[in-house]
Amino acid sequence: MQIDKLSNQYHNLFSIIEESGALKNPFFERCRRNELSEDELRTYLINWFQITKTFAINTLNYSAMVARKLQLKQFTISRERIEAFLLGVIEIAAVEFESTTKDRNNFHYKAFARLAPKLGIDVTKLDNDDYPLLSETLRLALNIVEYFDDEDVISGFAILFVVETIAYNIVESMNNSFAQAKDPYGNMLYNINETWYISKHLILELEHSDEVSSMLKILNLNESQFETMKIKVAKVSNSFNNFWNALNEKKN
């Protein structure tokens, strides 16, 4: 896909995300300084697991909805454009499930869960949603589900656009916190296999940021559609900002 990060629409949306606090915030700054306590790492892991799992599973629902609309010819833009857009959605969804390895243990939310045991978190309980979650986590997860389920393609794309725009910063915060954690003897807490989710996404998320900028150009939103996109991007961004603020407020 052709990258287009110079368009007014892209910059307008990027500014909304940036101004919301979803992209840069005090929590990320504390991660950068490696200030999170073990309890805070546990809280981060339990709550982020829910978000990354919700995002991954619902990208599949969104790709199916876009494909169905393509089949029913329910788009105002050309078939060629929507096919190109669908390819972008499928690529993001396929990567979430690490489809090339055909190993369910490499589903990205399962790979993230490799960090759990050394923090005293039971992976089965984590996967079964048995740990209590922050109210902001529940609201963000609900926002993701509702927008991906919405028959308006713009809603699901708002989720993709925000997530893939801030994703590198998210993974960088993990690289500065989880990946730098040490055991009581001063040794690194995690090995390479356990931090695979982090190292993998430090590469992937730069590509996905380019992907959604290209998808925005493909959709060729008119003025009314773009106003809708801005409103939805703002809502998703604010949900993420509230999530990061809630995590930051859990500091000791």
Image (spheres, grey):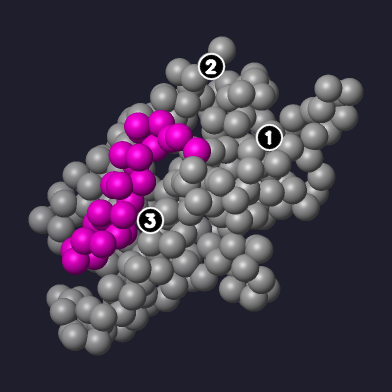
Name which of mark 1 and mark 3 comes first in the sequence.
1
Whole-percent x, y for residue 78 in the image: 23, 81
Name which of mark 2 and mark 3 comes first in the sequence.
3
**Which residue is found at the position 35% from the left and 33% from the top?**
136
Label drawn at residue 160: 3
From this view, report whether residue 251 is shown above or below residue 242: above
Q: Main secondary structure of the magenta part?
A: helix
Type of the residue with mark 1: Gly
Q: Quadrant of residue 67?
A: bottom left
From this view, report whether residue 126 is shown above or below residue 42: below
Which residue range is magenta in the image?
Answer: 131-157
Q: Quadrant of residue 70?
A: bottom left
Type of the residue with mark 2: Lys
Tell whether 130 sits left or right of 178: left
Label drawn at residue 120: 1
Q: Out of 155 and 134, give the one closest to the viewer.
A: 134
Whole-percent x, y for residue 32 in the image: 63, 26
Whole-percent x, y for residue 57 in the image: 43, 62
Label drawn at residue 251: 2
Could you tell me which secondary element the residue under label 1 belongs to? loop
Could you tell me which secondary element the residue under label 3 belongs to? helix
Q: CA distance from mark 2 to mark 3?
A: 29 Å
**Which residue is found at the position 45% from the left and 18% from the top?**
249
Tell whether 81 sits left or right of 116: left
Q: Is residue 1 visible?
A: no
Q: CA distance from mark 2 to mark 1?
A: 18 Å
Asked whether residue 81 is drawn in magenta, I would say no
Are there few (<14), some (14-19), or many (20+) residues within 10 Å of tag 1? few
Name which of mark 2 and mark 1 comes first in the sequence.
1
